[in-house]
Amino acid sequence: MKKCKKDHKIFIAVFLCIPFLVSAQFHTLKIPRSSNKVIETQQLGVTDVTIDYSSPSVNNREVWNDIEVIPQSGDPIAWRAGANMNTTIYFSTDVLIEGKVLKAGTYGFHIIPNDNNFTLLFAHNNNQWGSYYLDREKDVTMEVKVQGEECPFSEKLDYEFLNWSEDSVTIALEWADKRIPFKVSIDLNKTVIESFRNELRGINTYHWQAWNDAASWCLQHNTNLEEALEWANRSIQGGYHGFAAEENLTNLVTKARLLKKLNKDDDLTTTLEQAEHLVSNPREANMISFLMLQLEQPKKALDFSNGMLVKYPDAWFLNINKGISFYFMGQKEEALKELRAVAEIAPEQFQKRLGEIIQEVTEDTYKMPNG
């Protein structure tokens, strides 16, 4: 009987403890939080950069001087660079952080402040509550050191993307009156071309525009030109058995410019002839004759413009191209004669530029605009 009473007391004690044990466990219920959740993605080139963090408020605190808010010098721990779970940063491709290589992936982001100097920690162990259990030796992939800056006051901690260029951006944590910036850069050509190769194997393989745009990007950046020419041809000729073929002036112009870059003159002549046969209006005639001039084919541009003027006699702008053709063929007087004749019929809004062209031809300073 005494044993039963003893067991009964133990049961009651355990039963009374259950609510406290349950309330101490973490759960996934979404509830309002004072440090709101933020997920922001920006694209650098074709590289996705996603920062996932919780944003605390200053709330009348000296946050940068309060060790209860931001631990200093890693004592006793690093700072989670936000609130709640550690901040994470995801890069879809390899990047450089302050000039140091960091592989694609998701990293826990932690900071060790030391006065106005900051050590930034990128941890492959990226799923931690705060920084309490961060093992700096085992969990951290890379460390970089940066200096803080003053910035306009920000009540909420946030991350800004600043100083954009084609291949770099500065990511900056801003809170209160301090900014912690670090530069992220990419190998633009490598990442973009690898992305093209991957995407052109998916649904984009059926769209001539995708192949042409990839080829055009390489042309504009003067990179990967031989493969870009293959992509231009794929845009024109299609895939297996000519599937999704689409020969048009857009992709033929891209191909012609690539052939010029690659010094493939015979193929260039053939491609320009293909383009000529597709011209169906004065605007397209102007585009192709202008292209011929840009590709240093003035005689071809002159002959083509003459032919198009028979078909489109009111296309006065083709006479400008004729004049420029004469100029690049070394027939300056004939060029000026043609251009001055155009000045008598060109609309008022074009007179200023036409006058400038005549002046430049007179002074032998005229240059073709870039394509």
Image: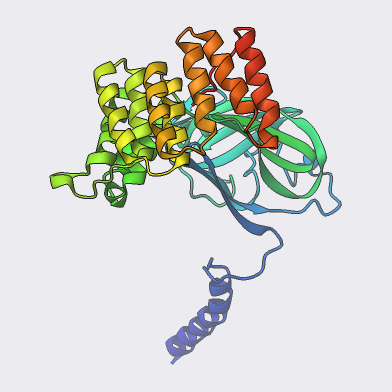
Instruction: Name the residue rendered at 52%, 34% in the picture.
Output: 136
The quadrant of the image that shows the N terminus is bottom left
Residue 232 place in picture, x, y as percent: 30, 34
- Residue found at the far bottom of this picture: 1
Q: Residue at horizontal 54%, vertical 32%?
A: 317
Figure check: 299 above or below 102:
above
Q: Position of residue 346 (x, y in %)?
A: 63, 33
324 with respect to 65 (left or right): left
Q: Please, which residue is most extreme toward the right here?
A: 60
Which residue is more in the foreground, 207 or 113? 207
> From the viewer's perspective, is 19 left or right of 35?
left
Query: Is 19 placed above or below 325 here?
Result: below
Residue 124: tell me if it is visible. no
**Image spot of residue 106 (x, y percent):** 46, 43
Q: Residue furthest left?
A: 241
Closer to the camera in the image, 348 or 366: 348
Q: Nearer the viewer, residue 366 or 167?
A: 366
> Is 241 left, or right, of 52 in this rendering?
left
Tell me where residue 169 appears, x and y as whole percent: 60, 33
233 with respect to 351 (left or right): left
| Quadrant of the image occupied by residue 183 | top right
* 332 or 49, nearer to the observer: 332
The count of marks equals 0
Q: Is residue 217 visible?
A: yes
Q: How is the image coloured?
A: rainbow
